[in-house]
Image: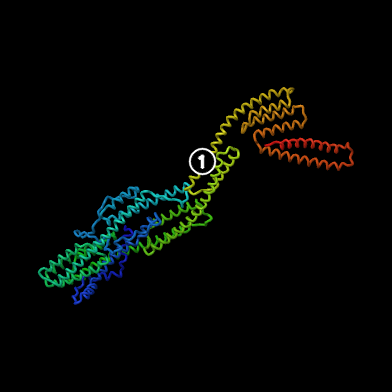
Amino acid sequence: MLDDKEIQEGNNLSEEKMPDAAANLEAQPVEEKNNEKNVLDTENKDVSKEQQVEESVKEAEIKEEKSNKATAEDSDAEVEAKEPESEEKTVAERDNLEVTSTSVVDKKTDKPKDKPTEPSVNYKTLSFEELNKYLQKLIKSDDVAGVKEEVDKIKRTFNKKYKELLAEKKAEFIKDNGNEIDFHYRDKEYGNFKDLLFEYKTKRDRFYKQQAQEQKENLEKRLALIEKLKELIDNAEPDNMYNDYKAIQAEWKTIGKIPHNKYNDTWRTYHHHVERFYDLLHLSNDFRDLDFKHNLEGKLQLIERAKGLLAYTDLNKAFNELQVLHQLWKEDYGPVARDKREEIWEEFSEITKQIHHKRHEYQKILDKKYEVNAEAKREIIGQITGLIGDENEESHKYWQQKIKELEALRKEFFKIGKVPRYMNEQIWQEFRAATRNFNRRKNKYYKNLKHEQYKNLEKKRELIKIAQEHKDSDDFEKTTDLMKKIQSDWKKIGHAPRKYSDKIWKEFKSACNYYFDRLHGVQDQNNKEQIAVFEKKKELLENIKSQAKNTEKLSETLINAYLDDWQKLGVLTGRMRHVEVKFNKLIQKLYEKLDVDKETVEMLKFKNVINNYIANNDTKKLNHEQLFIRRKIDEITKEVQQLENNISFFSNADDDNPLLKGVYENIENYNEELKIWQSKLDYLVGLKY
């Protein structure tokens, strides 16, 4: 099965040109006129038909080489955004050198010369370092043009593998909460690869400059031979002229290529004077007929070889062989007898037309396939365009999903295959425009995200400042709450730029850890002390319980002594405070057993509670207690006022009225209660806490 490139070659040879190409190349020699310019004009007309075929063959090859560059290099161009879609023109192309890829012929076998073959290398299995070693080896070769194909293979393989590596590294970067717009990666071997490519291009350009100079020198040699041939004709010596002509012909064949833009005129001029020579040679028909016979036999062999090409299934190979045969026809074999010229050229030309026709028909089949490919590619372009949704939906997760979808569509796009040549550039530009629009929207989002991340960076630096300012604080109660708060705030702020995130996190974490390590150290020491206090208080509680059984000795002084002993042992916190509750309940019961008034008992109990708060430095409970007492005083005062107002309803009642007595009793009870609450408030207000 032919690949697309093979079928594309030679398509510019239109059917309209073929009848002209079949015209008689070797027309009758023109009678030499007085003015050589007129002779050359006539000769140009005689040889134009065969030359048209030769030019068409070369033109087909040159155009084919350009036609598929965009498609062939699409995937390579994605590795770096600034890498051109096709390689820069070579020196040979700029200087119009005579370059035809299949026109090099082995003169011994009349077959195309094969390039030196080396064991086939599967570049896909090699590492970047190994690819560079192979590339370096190729660059050292003297055959600069011959290694181009292998260099291109290595270039495509390296770029593809490096693109995959970039995608892998980017995925890891993003997975670690990196911002895609901050991603940058450069492998050492990639730099070596670019240096080697530059070295190759420099060497290649130098080679083509040298080739251009050699072709210029070859042109001068051929022009000198033409002058020598003209001199031979003008000063003919029958005895030596044929041998001299053969010597000129042999030397002509040994001269290498000349600049392509000079080739046609040079060949026509030479061919014209060859015809002049054969016209002159009629004085010695034996030599001329012998040469005609040799040329006829050679051209008939070429026709037979051309017929064999019609059976080839590999149309590209047949086309390349046909180019070789045309070159041999023109370069190696001269004129034949006049009565055979038209006949053999028509036969050779007809075979040429058939081969081109087969290629043309097969190309039609391919074009239909390419049109289907074009529709498929445009459908994918539409899907890429549709990837972009509402800006309000955008998020980091959203874009990562869209990037994966785009990559899948891109792979599908390149997998589809070629499209008709006339649509190739248009579809490629549509594809680039769709992906460019996608990337613009994506980059816009990440630029905005980056702006937000720099705001987050400043917020986090403020938290770092707070953490560092308080890490040595000894006010553990307040500072612990503050540290917990800024840790919570840190989590809520969001991501900072990746290049700063690790550094600021370490600074923040270090300050927080420093503080909490100090806190835990203090807490560990306090725990040991608390356990000792707990054991002592538990023992004291048991002693007080035993002594309290003897109520005869119970007094306020004794209870206060219990309180002093208890407070001297220290303060308990956390889960060990339950022993404090037991102690307070015991003290409350002891106060109730004293032979004192209710107010005194209440105040003793109240002072015990308040003193515990003070011992624990619990200002919050002290403040709460003061507010509670003030509310109670207000409530009781209002109750008393209400009861006093109610007495007015009993203005006509006797003092013995039960209801009236009840009101007075309630007022008296409330006043006693109010007195106790007022005493509690006075006690609290008098404290300094």
For the C terminus, give its image quadrant. Answer: top right
The amino acid type found where label 1 is placed reads Ser
Residue visible at 73% across and 31% down?
604
How many badges with numbers are in the image?
1
For the N terminus, give its image quadrant. Answer: bottom left
Residue visible at 64% across and 25% down?
539
x then y, percent, for residue 79: 39, 54
x then y, percent, for residue 6: 31, 60
Residue visible at 60% across and 30% down?
530
On screen, residue 271 versus residue 516, left or right, reads left
On screen, residue 108 versus residue 487, left or right, reads left
Residue underneath mark 1: 510
Regarding residue 531, the answer to whether it shows in the image is yes
Quarter of the image holding residue 244?
Answer: bottom left
Answer above or below: position of 198 versus 596.
Answer: below
Mark 1 secondary-structure assignment: helix
On screen, residue 664 versus residue 619, left or right, reads right
Quarter of the image holding residue 299?
Answer: bottom left
Quarter of the image holding residue 289?
Answer: bottom left
x then y, percent, for residue 135: 31, 51
Q: Residue furthest bottom?
A: 34
Answer above or below: position of 179 versus 26.
Answer: above
x then y, percent, for residue 506: 49, 43
